[in-house]
Image (cartoon, helix red, strand yellow):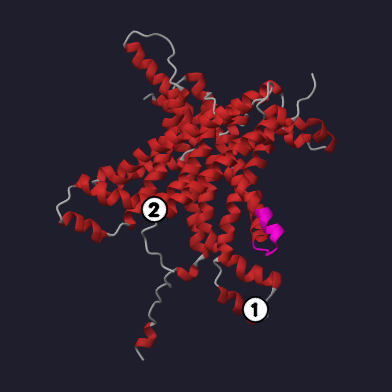
Amino acid sequence: MDFAFMQEAFLRLITGIPLTLNLAFTSIAFGAVLAMLLALLRMSNVKVLDWLAQAYVFVFRGTPLLVQIFLIYYGLGQFRPTLQELGLWGFFREPYWCAVLALTLNTAAYGSEIIRGGLQAVPHHQVEAARACGMSGFLLFRRIIFPIAVRQALPAYGSEIILMVKATSLASVITMMEVTGLAAKMISQTFRAVEVFIVAGLIYLVLNFVITRIIMAIEWWLSPHLRRPPAVEPRLEAAHV
Amino acid sequence: MQQLSYFELVGFGPNGWGWALLMATGMTIAVATCGFLAGSVVGTFVAWGKIGGNAPVRWLSDGYTTVLRGIPDLLVIYLFYFGGSAALGAIGSLFGAEGFIGVPAFVTGALAIGIVSGAYQAEVFRGAYQVVSRGELEAARSVGMHRWLMFRRIIAPQVLRYAIPGLGNTWQLVLKESALISVTGLVELLRQSQVAAGSTRRPFDFYITAAILYLVITWVSTYLFQRAETYSLRGMRRAS
């Protein structure tokens, strides 16, 4: 084990962290919005919309992410003249935006099922109580349903975020130089797979560890009702009366 | 040259890529299956380590599942592809062989998938083992069954029954992971589509075909796992 080399690898690979996090969080942010829309379509009780959302989820969960990335980045190149006419070629020419698009569409499919589970787990009596107070429509959704659903869905969504951080590694196949891309380049230059692998693996483990901690903190912050109440200091002056 | 229609392109005619794509689909299924089975073996031992091991063994197997589930699969594939060749080269040079010795892409692919999916399957098996009733294990011990006999007659059949849904999920992961093996040059479905797309300049047609074939495999395997689940539960009373 060559520690000088590993240090060099570490210094080279950490320059890829910003891009890894950038890809992950951009696509998670867009993906969460799309996932919410899909979950609402699934629960809309309109057959056509429900069916559309189901088909979307089936297609994006049933095919490998790498195929989706290739389909968008290389596949759409086949329609280059049409895309140029529409003025969209600038978007699809960039590997960054293609990767973000593919990751967004992919995470939305998984996320919509998680959000749907969260929405369905909102206790019915809470909704009834809110209705009894005169809430309805968007107010009911914003104040009662959405916060409870988010709380229920957060642990599962947390593992989806970890999966997305791992999935950004596939962007390296379409020339994005994030951590895995830099690692692959370094391995093929030096043929020291084990050292580079250990360093890159450690970087991902630390990233994922920090993210899990952050999600756990948010979970703790969102569920004050499950925490023990703080111990109340006995009021001494009352005891002396 | 006139433009071929989509169905001529992916069909089985003289200019069609149908047979090549079908063979590649077979290769995808083969590498995924081998990887999955390797993962079952790894997963069984890791689950055993987690359940019945002493402290260092437990610590090791916990570390294994945490690490392998926390790093990207693509990195593991690169490790096996480049690292495997380097290791073989080193062993080869001991015996006087010279130069680069490549590991067959199928073997590296199946091994990488096995190592990763082993971590997932270990968790599935551990969860299923915890559902097996303690009373049955005690009963087996009380009639004098040894470890191996007890594993074969009592534990394995029941763990398998409870593990089927989780194994189904892992199989889907493995199937999608097998697409990543294309980076090592193994001619499976995605690699074959890349080759075809490159030589015909019709990338969209071939990638969408690959996507459809993957969907078909997923769909059929979901059906088979459901069948297996109902079959394995045929003797169980269901709470209604």
Secondary structure at badge 1 equals helix
**Residue at image point 43% right, 34% down:** B35
The quadrant of the picture occupied by the N terminus of chain B is: top right
- Relative to A49, does residue B201 appear above or below in the rendering? above
Judging depth in this view, the residue of A84 and A139 nearest the camera is: A84
- The segment highlighted magenta reads A43-53
* Residue B240 position by quadrant: bottom left
Q: Mark on residue A131?
A: 1
- Asked whether residue B10 is in view, the answer is yes
**In which chain is the residue bearing label 2?**
B
Q: Is residue A91 left or right of residue B123?
A: right
- How many other residues sit within 10 Å of disc 2, few (<14), some (14-19) or many (≥20)? some
Looking at the rendered structure, the secondary structure element under dot 2 is helix
Residue B60 rendering spot, x and y as whole percentages: 31, 41
Q: Is residue A200 visible?
A: no
Dot in front, 1 or 2? 2
> Residue placed farthest to the right in the image?
A85
Q: Quick check: A29 above or below A222? A: above
Whether discs 1 and 2 lie on one chain: the answer is no
Q: Chain of mark 1?
A: A
Residue located beneath label 2 in the image: B232
Q: Which residue in the rendered view is the most extreme toward the bottom?
A: A241
